[in-house]
Amino acid sequence: MPSRVVKRSAAILLLSILLFEFTSGTPLDNSWVTNLGLLFAILISICVLFIAPLFIGFRNWRLTLLGFFVALAGGWWLVGSFGQGGDRVIGSIKMNDGREICLLHTYSGDFADPYHVELCFRKSDGTWKQYLVRRGDTRWWIGSISLKADSKEIIVRKFVFPTARFSLATEQLTWLPSGTKLDGKVSAPTWSPESEIKLNRLRAALP
């Protein structure tokens, strides 16, 4: 019986993590209840995987080790998704005319949605503009920006799903799938994504 519990809990844990990454903060994200349910399933599965192997012991040491390993991996993912340390620039595109686009991923400290994601656009004159992609989200383990073949739009992706698109002609960001359009906020002359990351890390280090 404990062996069956370990196998099923491991499967539920891995499937729940994949579903959470596929849905949270993507166009498939249509309910906070679903995300909360997946997080609950992940937490329960981790607890079960830590406890159930104790009843198996050395009778099936491979399954015992597997249970602990999967539980540790799930715990690492859970802590990393909500904990600090994820400040970084996700991808950067530099164009021949001096324009630059990057995705800024910073820790906010909010309990439920600890990360902000912004698209940063530097114009030819060196001025930066910031566009909010996600005000609150868990850590983006996998994110990317890409330039479409016509060189007119930038596509922002979380995991594999497009979450926003940015028009280089109108300098507007469009949220997907809602279609909401946003104008960027002009940054201070001395601002840059790298300076924002350094400042954010300094804030996190303060008591």
Image (cartoon, rainbow, N blue to C red):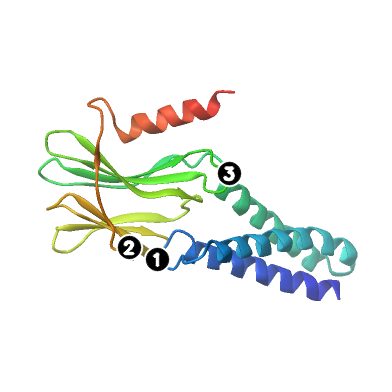
Q: In this view, which residue lies farthest toward the left?
A: 97
**First in sequence: mark 2 or mark 3?**
3
| Real-space CA distance between mark 3 and mark 1, rounded to the nearest whole angstrom | 22 Å
Residue at x-position 54% and y-position 61%: 32
Image position of 170 with respect to 193: above or below: below
Q: Is residue 65 visible?
A: no
Q: Amino acid at mark 1?
A: Pro
81 horizontally vs 187: left or right: right
Where is residue 22 shown, x and y percent of the image?
Answer: 48, 66
Q: Position of residue 151 (x, y in %)?
A: 14, 58
Looking at numbered disc 3 in the image, what kind of residue is underneath it?
Phe
Helix, strand or loop at label 2? It is: loop
Tag 1 residue? 27
Which residue matches tag 3?
111
Badge 3: residue crowd in 10 Å (few <14, some 14–19, many ≥20):
few
In the image, is residue 134 above or below residue 207? below
Give yes or no for contact between labels 1 and 2 (Cβ–Cβ under 8 Å). Answer: yes
Residue holding disc 2: 176
Q: Residues within 10 Å of mark 2 (few under 14, many from 20)?
A: some
The residue lying at 88 percent from left, 67 percent from top is 56
Question: Could you tell me residue 68's position as x and y percent?
Answer: 75, 58
